[in-house]
Every structure is written in structure tokens, then in C-alpha cells.
Amino acid sequence: LPPPLKPCTAWPGRCPRLRGLCFPGQNGCIPLVDPFASESLDVSTSVQHLILLHRAVMVVLPLSLVLLVCGWICGLLSSLAQSVSLLLFTGCYFLLGSVLTLAGVSIYISYSHLAFAETARQYGPQHMQGVRVSFGWSMALAWGSCALEAFSGTLLLSAARTLSLSPPLCGHLSPQQVGGR
């Protein structure tokens, strides 16, 4: 198990200039980095790249989830209203959400592999021999979500097409039929 997080003052002289929490590393205290901190960090370019990837993951995946929930609402309303334009909008919205989910998952995978490589570079490959990077159930859910969003978008677009080609229901006249009378 990793050592517990402690205030950086718990290791006097080993954590200069650090605020917040950190955990003990091989060569002193390793700070927990806030990826959205405005101050510039004195770290290597590879670590800066990892911080940028972490920031992207922390924005893209929650945004994808918010878009998914809003898409459910739009999909329900457009289906109940049987509006071709709303169905088209919602179908495109779901396809955009699936692309965003795919981007977020891809960035996360890249981030995980680069973080592992950077850790191996910092601590040496001998410390990382028995470690392997794998993803759990949340990754499977993210891939499933991406596929289901794309499928939902496709179904909504086909529903819009079917609705635009079908005759009006319940005796309602289309604008073309009203103008033809």
C-alpha cells in the first residue's frame, strides 16, 4: 500500500516551497500537482505534457457525461413532439457526444501510458518490472457509452428521416397538403 498523504510540513526540510499535501517518495517528498494551477511549475516538458493531458481528461470526460444527460432530455422531448428538426438536432448531438467520449477515452489511455513511462524514467525500469497498466470496469463502461451514444444518434437520425417521409398521423395535414387544396 502507498504511504498515507500527510501535510508537507510532516517531513521538515524535505518539502521546500510546497503547499498542500504530498506523499513520501524515494528522494524526498513528491507534491500532488493541481493541473489547473495558474502558477508555472518548474518541471520537465514531459511532465508538463502529462499535466496538460490530465487537464484535458478532467474537462472532456465530465463534459461528455453532462452532454449525455442533456441528450437524454432532448431525445425524450423530440421523440414525444415527433419533430423532424428536433430529432435531427438530437441525433447530431448524440453523435457529437460520442466523438467527445471517444476523444476523452483516447486521451485518458494516452495519459496513462505516458504517466507510466515517465514514472519508469524517474524511478528506473527495475522498480517497474512487475507493474502493468490495465483498465477496469470504468473503461469498459466508457467504451460502451461511446458505442451506445453513436447508436442512439444513428437511431434518432433514422427516426427523423422516417418521420419526414411518412404521411401525417391522426388526420393532421402537412403544409404541402394544405397548400394543395
Image (spheres, rainbow, N blue to C red):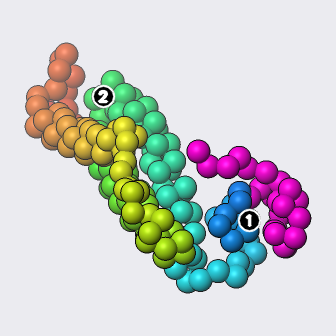
Q: Is residue 14 left or right of residue 165?
A: right
Q: Secondary structure at mark 1?
A: strand
Q: Amino acid at mark 1?
A: Cys
Q: Amino acid at mark 2?
A: Ser
Report crowding for label 1: few under 14, some 14 to 19, many 20 or more residues within 10 A (C-alpha): many
Which one is nearer the viewer's eye here, 78 or 11? 11
Which one is nearer the viewer's eye here, 96 or 42? 42
> Which mark is on residue 165?
none
Report crowding for label 2: few under 14, some 14 to 19, many 20 or more residues within 10 A (C-alpha): some
- Residue 23 location, x and y as percent? 71, 57
| Residue shown at the point (87%, 70%) measured from the top left | 13
Quadrant of res 86 = top left
Q: Is residue 142 magenta?
A: no
- Residue 155 location, x and y as percent? 20, 37
Above/below status of 107 relative to 161: below
| Residue shown at the point (40%, 33%) measured from the top left | 72
Q: Are marks 2 and 1 in contact (CB under 8 Å)?
A: no
Quadrant of res 87 = top left
Q: Is residue 131 visible?
A: yes
Q: Which contiguous range is marked in magenta?
A: 1-22
Q: Is residue 147 left or right of residue 167?
A: right
Q: Which residue corresponds to mark 2?
A: 79
Above/below status of 152 relative to 40: above
